[in-house]
Amino acid sequence: MFRPSSLQLALSLLAMSVTAERLERLRLYLSFLTVFCLYGTTVGFSMAQAPDTTGGPELYPDTVITTEHTVEVDGETIRYTADAGYLPLRAEDGTVQAKMFYVAYRKAGTDQEDRPITFAFNGGPGSSSVWLHLGALGPRRVPVVSDSTNVLSPPYELVDNGQTWLDFTDLVFIDPVTTGYSRSTSAVDEDRFHGFEGDIESVSRFIRLYTTRNDRWSSPKFLAGESYGTVRAAGLASALQDRHGMYLNGIVLVSAVLNYQANAFDRGNDLVYPLFLPTYAATAHYHGALPADQQGRDLRTFLDEVEQWATTDYTVALMQGDALPDAERERVIDRLHQYTGLSREFIDDANLRVVDRHFYKELLRDEGQTVGRLDSRFTAQDRLDVGAGPEFDPSYVAILGPYTATLNSYVRGELGFETDLPYEILTGRVWPWNYETFENQYLDVAEPLRQAIHKNPALRVHVASGYYDVATPYFATDYVLDHMGLGAKYRDNVSVSYYESGHMMYVHMPSLRQFTDNVETFYRDATD
């Protein structure tokens, strides 16, 4: 993603006339930049101007629009109803604090008491639910992008999704406040919604209220979250139980990040390097960048070896720091070269610790290519081949245009919901995100998830990870799951699946099919 330089910020300051409005906009911009640099979160910065309120449809329509549709799944025609609109969050005095936009799908002709319902959302923080909605779960989807050799060209269109989860669960896609069309009211400070606690509080209120208004308290209930949405899902599992007495049947965590320490390239945090190494190795294997004796190996067999070495010899070597003997250092450098394809000189200069953004730029530097963060199968070309990191994430820009255009067309056209508000796909308007609960420590939601399972032994969790996801590497996720402290009798409550794709594994058609099959089995087991 775009990282503004100090020079660019200075020029922006000089170009601005000093008005209160512009100073406030700059303050928000600098706050977002600070958090972005600290956490490396992939977000798009978007400070939308106040919309024109003259003419056109209402900005916040009160009516939920209901339409009827069909989709074919495995040769069967499924009739379903779609609802698109706002659910207002009110204080107990009736004051509207926020209007949360959602799209819900209900399979026709089913008994709602027995029919599962799934509340789905993405992450960011600052992301709408568009990715899961039009990528994997919903009845309509964006055609697969596959990789950088098969990127979609505008104009874009949606296709029927034969892999839709609507076959086995009703679906509610939630846009948290300030994402999508969701907004706080003018009477309420929107910052209250922009943080770990406020976000979970508002989304849990939405889920309780939707469940109540639609008579779904007796339905089996599931959550599906992606990326930071897995943080939200883990927090919600505990909050829904403790605050609202709502016990879940299952949670699907897509590209999970449950403990920031496992993903943070902070000085002194050597844990992160062994956990990222298998994803570096998978990426090098995919691009044919490994030494010849490694390149021809089966991917899974190769990764088994890399994981074993990462958690033994490599971890021990890093723990020794500057006291590592020269001979052992050379052995580590050689093994890292064998597993990543990076030059021995580069690994030595990196002090055995390869930061993610350096890897994106270095792996294919000789070919003038960078690799993606969300999906390292994707490549692109920077203006210059020099530099420590890439100009942008090629895997993000490949999906941003198709998902944005199709969502805007779909909601207004097929779903009949009209507003002139901008649909915030992935926005920086929620920044700075409030992590006050975890001040001076790493965010860790593995513990509340453990508590939720111990309190509700019926709760099942399925984790889906992509081998080529460098944003939330699969081995880092596995490490956190293995350190949750689950009691022995609860460990089978958690299952994991892996895909030869990236963060959004569903952009790869074979992975989408496998993902849907695995989740359908998970739902069946969780409701038996």
Image: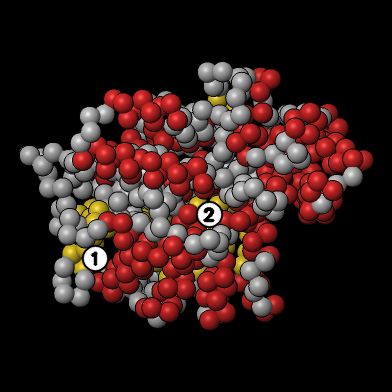
Residue 150 in the image: above or below residue 194 = above
Query: Where in the figure is residue 514, as x and y percent of width and height?
Result: 59, 50
Q: Residues within 10 Å of mark 1 (few under 14, many from 20)?
A: many
Is residue 237 something that shows in the picture?
yes
Q: Residue at x 12, y 47 (%)?
A: 58
Which residue is at the front of the view, 15 or 110? Answer: 15
Q: Which marked residue is nearer to the observer: mark 1 or mark 2?
A: 1
Residue 119 in the image: above or below residue 150 = below
Q: Residue at x 37, y 49 (%)?
A: 431
Say which residue label 1 marks. 89
Q: Which mark is residue 254?
A: 2
Q: Quadrant of residue 84?
A: bottom left
Q: Amino acid at mark 2?
A: Val
Specify whether 64 is left or right of 465: left
Query: Where in the figure is residue 346, as x and y percent of width and height?
Result: 75, 30
Between the residue at mark 1 and the residue at mark 2, the CA separation in whole angstroms equals 27 Å
The secondary structure type at the circle numbered 1 is strand
Q: Residue at x 35, y 56 (%)?
A: 194
Q: Which mark is residue 488?
A: none
